[in-house]
Amino acid sequence: MAVPVLPALADLVLPRVCAGCGLPGRVLCPGCARLLTEPRPAQPRRFPDGFPPTVAAGPYAGPVRPAINAFKEQGRAELAGPLGAALALAVVAVRLAVPGPPRAVLLVPMPASRAAVRARGRDHVRELTGRAVTELRAAGVTAAECRLLRRRGRVRDSAGLTAAERRANLAGTFAVAGPLPVADLLVLVDDVVTTGATLTEAAGVLSAGLGRAAPPVVAAVVAATPRSPDDLDRLSRPLRND
Ligand SMILES: [Zn+2]
């Protein structure tokens, strides 16, 4: 009879509050989770040349911001479930956007720098990728994870840099890490896209490194900086928690 007590005990020790809005009860309340169920194309303000077709599960604004930051920076690893499910939704949406028959997808996590992994004690994008693959397979999608990219060299903080400077700063950051497994579609995955510079650099390296044999390269993220009035309107609606 001890087993049912454990979750209740865990809740006493670690009271659950929504990482988005602070409402007690769940790690992400239904109202906040719903913000990550309307996939839309990511639209960086200045589309970098070569920006891959990218779908985000929701806007990186409102309660989504603190939820992702709690997962990424504050060690709330239990958010991998709902955020990984959101990422899976974005993968499904971007897969549907590619012409042709349904494709087997290979999720390529954006590689973290050693410094970031050391600071956080974990690679949160890989955690999201693993959960997304589980969700996709449960939904009948042929999906796998492949660490096809690795980082090389250091990147300085991009805050305050112009778009061209960011591009130059990122050049040479990534390299193809190994042979390409069988796949119809490569989906770069990350938590958030803001300027799109990092995804653009990674997609370019994949396409160039794999040559003509490369399948299409697209991207999926949990959230993207909102650009359209529609996105902002959606956020201004009152959140319902039912
Ligand atoms: Zn909430």
Image (tube, helix red, strand yellow):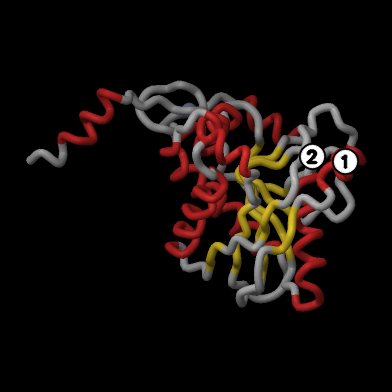
Q: Quadrant of the C terminus?
A: top left
Q: Residue 105: where, in percent of width, then height?
A: 60, 67
- The residue located at (19%, 35%) in the rendering is 6
Callout 1 amino acid: Arg
Between 150 and 18, the one nearer to me in the picture: 150
Q: Earlier in the sequence, mark 2 or mark 1?
A: 1
The answer to whether residue 191 is left or right of residue 242 is: right
Q: Which residue is mark 2?
A: 195
In this view, the residue farthest toward the left is: 1
- The residue located at (38%, 31%) in the rendering is 26
Q: Which residue is mark 1?
A: 46
Q: Is label 2's Cβ within 8 Å of ligand 1?
A: no
SS class of the residue under badge 1? loop
Number of other residues with Cα within 10 Å of mark 2, as a class: few under 14, some 14 to 19, many 20 or more: many
- The residue located at (28%, 28%) in the rendering is 11
Callout 2 amino acid: Thr
SS class of the residue under badge 2? loop
Instruction: Look at the numbered discs 2 and 1 and tell me whether their residues touch, using CB distance below 8 Å.
Output: yes
Name the quadrant containing residue 29. Answer: top left
